[in-house]
Image (spheres, rainbow, N blue to C red):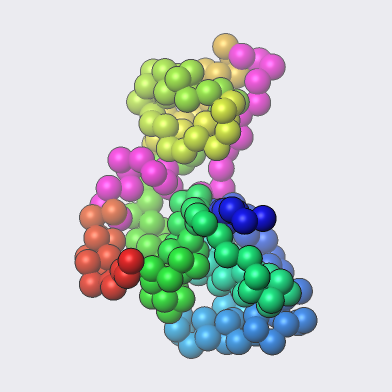
Amino acid sequence: MAEIMYIFPGQGSQYKGIGKDLYSEFDIARDLYDQANEILGYDIVKLSFNDEDHKISLTEFTQPVLLTHQIACLAVFNQLTENHLKPKLMAGHSLGEYAALVTSGCISFEDGLKLVSRRGQLMGAHGEGSMLALPFNYEESASLAEEYDCQVATINLEQQTVVGGTDSNIASLQEGISKLYPKKRTVKLDTEGAFHTDLMMVAAEEFKKTLSVTNFSQ
């Protein structure tokens, strides 16, 4: 266990009731959730546990929900292992990168929450298009995506690539694949836009303003 790595997940890993078990059992998790409430200015506990207004999958709220949960998970893990494990590397899948930054000490939990809150607001406001997971490698997916004016967004596995594009182009791509490969299954992602593609450029440019005034340490 001398050399371990922590990897944090991205959007799509949220669910109603997320974090409720930690909150009910561990003081350190309760403290983090209470701190998040104050930073965000709304009740993230109620949102995460009850989701009465069905907001947990709106990216504006998904991102703070997941960051808070990930840092709470880590805090509980560290408590249970008496802080004996120190990772050599930290990484994250999209939103998970911010949990890695917080864990590394590059940014504070407060700054991390403010960043993902703003990031989620901008991605929700300026997001357009949709995303489709393909059961192909990068080269095959890139070729198919290009035919329908779509782009590769993320590479999840060697044989699972996510592409993004306008709603109509993604629909055409999905239909085209079903005809070419009737035994292959594509999956439409539950997102508010084609994340990690050029369709998010407006949100990215706006987000630069927030990043420019955030303190990142070594």
- Asked if the magenta segment contains residue 194, the reply would be yes
Say whether residue 139 is left or right of residue 189. left
- Asked if the magenta segment contains residue 34, the reply would be no
**Quarter holding residue 169:** top left
Say whether residue 41 is left or right of residue 199. right
- Assign the N terminus to one quadrant of the image: bottom right
Viewer-closest of 69 and 127: 69
**In the image, what residue occupies the spot 69% across and 76% down?**
82
Count the labels in the image: 0
Viewer-closest of 15 and 99: 99
- Is residue 165 shown to the viewer in this render? yes
The correct choice, above or below, for 167 with respect to 140 in the image is: below
Q: Please, what is the dominant secondary structure of the magenta stretch?
A: loop
**In the image, what residue occupies the spot 46% across and 33% down?**
163
The correct choice, above or below, for 67 with respect to 29 in the image is: above
**In the image, what residue occupies the spot 35% across and 26% down?**
149
Residue 6: percent from the left, percent from the top? Answer: 57, 56
**Quarter holding residue 17:** bottom right
The correct choice, above or below, for 191 with respect to 22 in the image is: above
Say whether residue 63 is left or right of residue 30. left
Say whether residue 25 is left or right of residue 86. right
Residue 84: percent from the left, percent from the top? Answer: 65, 70
Residue 112: percent from the left, percent from the top? Answer: 42, 71
**In the image, what residue occupies the spot 67% across and 61% down?**
15
Residue 120: percent from the left, percent from the top? Answer: 42, 62
In magenta, the rendered stretch is: 181-203
- Is residue 60 shown to the viewer in this render? no
- Assign the C terminus to one quadrant of the image: bottom left
